[in-house]
Amino acid sequence: MADSSLITPRDWTAHPPLIHPEYKSTVKRGPTKPLVPIRQSLSELTGPVYGHDALAPLDNDLTKNGAKNGEALGERIVVTGRVLDELGRPQPNALIEIWQANAAGRYVHANDQHDAPLDPNFFGGGRTVTDAEGRYRFYTIKPGAYPWPNHANAWRPNHIHLSLFGPSFASRLVTQMYFPGDPLLALDPIFLGTPEGARNRLVSDFSLDVTEEGFALGYVFDIVLRGPKETPMEAGR
């Protein structure tokens, strides 16, 4: 069982509010009454166990795991980083799942009727498990921006969704990763809903060291599950 003394309270000042009026759907689904803290028990201090044998060889390569008759279209990228706990310690065997739009800004989902092409060779989802040093690595296509009905002429920045299971259910995290220099960040109410001092934790860093010559640009995105430097949760969670 995890040591409860190592699970610190969440820093709620780093996370977006549960109701953020600029992000209109949160007004409809966000709780209107104060949250009720519960005492940590075995169910919160432990978590699911995932083995490497539960993963298929291409689960972390979105450029190939949806291929049917050719290559996925778009700018190939590498996304890597470390998963850390509140004390800065690496978290091995943490399951990370990602999902995203394709290069044209469209999801493989029945509800996405954006007037942009689907890529028959891109599924848009993947998963991996961190290694002994808490490192993870994905190959994928840089997602495109897309319109959404939150307000007039609204567009979501390029982003990747991430879902993590750490060593316990108390370290559960769903978040989004953005790209440096995206002009839409300054206009996006989901990104702006995160407190200003923590927004940079959602933006990846370009890395020439991670970039693979002649193949894919590299981005580094470290994830902290809890504590004073924790990665903000996805707005509207």
Image (cartoon, helix red, strand yellow):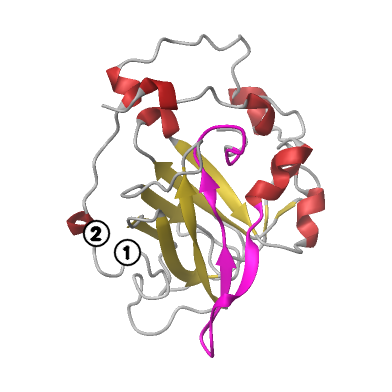
Q: Say which quadrant the N terminus sits in.
A: top left
Callout 1, which amino acid? Asp
Q: Say which quadrant the C terminus sits in.
A: top right
Q: Residue at image x 56%, y 57%?
A: 221
Q: In this orientation, which residue lies closer to the viewer: 194 or 150?
A: 194
* 225 shown above or below 105: above
Distance between the alpha carbons at the discs numbered 1 and 2? 6 Å
Callout 2, which amino acid? Leu
> Within 10 angstroms of label 1, few (less than 14), some, or many (20 or more) residues?
some
Report if residue 216 lies within the magenta region. yes
Residue at which label 2 appears: 55
Q: Residue at image x 47%, y 39%?
A: 85
Do the residues under discs 1 and 2 have CB atoms within 8 angstroms? Answer: yes
Instruction: Using residue 63 as the reference point, say whether residue 105 is left or right of it.
Output: right
Question: Which residues are the magenta region?
Answer: 203-232
> Within 10 angstroms of label 2, few (less than 14), some, or many (20 or more) residues?
some
Residue at which label 1 appears: 59
Q: In this orientation, which residue lies closer to the viewer: 5 or 41?
A: 5
